[in-house]
Image (cartoon, rainbow, N blue to C red):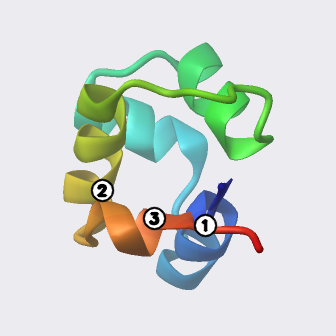
Amino acid sequence: MKNQMRVLLAKQRKKIVDVAEGTGLSKSTLTAIYYERTKRPGIDTLQKIANYLDVTIDELLRVEE
């Protein structure tokens, strides 16, 4: 699984700090997800990010073949 967080943030012209302030998640958690250092982020975390970016979890994540 790959996340589309980089693409979505670029399209919306937002930064990790904006997502942190809007979701209450820590910058370190968001940075780990952004750089794909976290292999299994929690569903609650993903849902908060998706809600903030106004996308579905499916749009946030992409399945690798």
Determine contact: label 2, label 1, CB under 8 Å. no
In depth, the one of 59 and 19 nearer the eye is 59
Q: Disc 1 on helix, strand or loop? A: loop
Q: Which residue is mark 3?
A: 60
Sort mark 2 into few (<14), some (14-19) or many (20+) by Cα contacts within 10 Å: many
Residue 44: image x %, image y %? Answer: 24, 29
Whether label 2 touches label 3, CB < 8 Å = yes
- Find out whether the residues at labels 3 and 1 contact each other: C-beta distance under 8 Å: yes
Q: Quadrant of residue 56?
A: bottom left
Residue at the image position 50 percent from the left and 27 percent from the top: 41
Q: Distance of mark 2 from mark 3, alpha carbons?
A: 6 Å
Q: Which residue sits furthest front? A: 65
Residue underneath mark 2:
50
Quarter of the image with the C terminus is bottom right
Q: Quadrant of residue 39?
A: top right
User: Image quadrant of residue 46?
Assistant: top left
Query: How far separated are the C-alphas under marks 2 and 1?
Result: 10 Å
Q: Position of residue 37 (x, y in %)?
A: 79, 28
Q: If you read the primary sequence from the N terminus, does the residue marked by circle 2 or circle 3 appear first? A: 2
Q: Nearer the viewer, residue 6 or 44?
A: 44
Please, is residue 32 above or below residue 11 in the view? Answer: above
Quarter of the image with the N terminus in it: bottom right
Mark 2 or mark 1: whose residue is earlier in sequence: 1
Q: Which residue is mark 1?
A: 4
Where 5 falls versus 27 (above or below)?
A: below
Q: Amino acid at mark 2?
A: Ala
* Residue drawn at the location 63% of the way across and 16% of the way down: 28
Circle 3 — which element?
A: helix
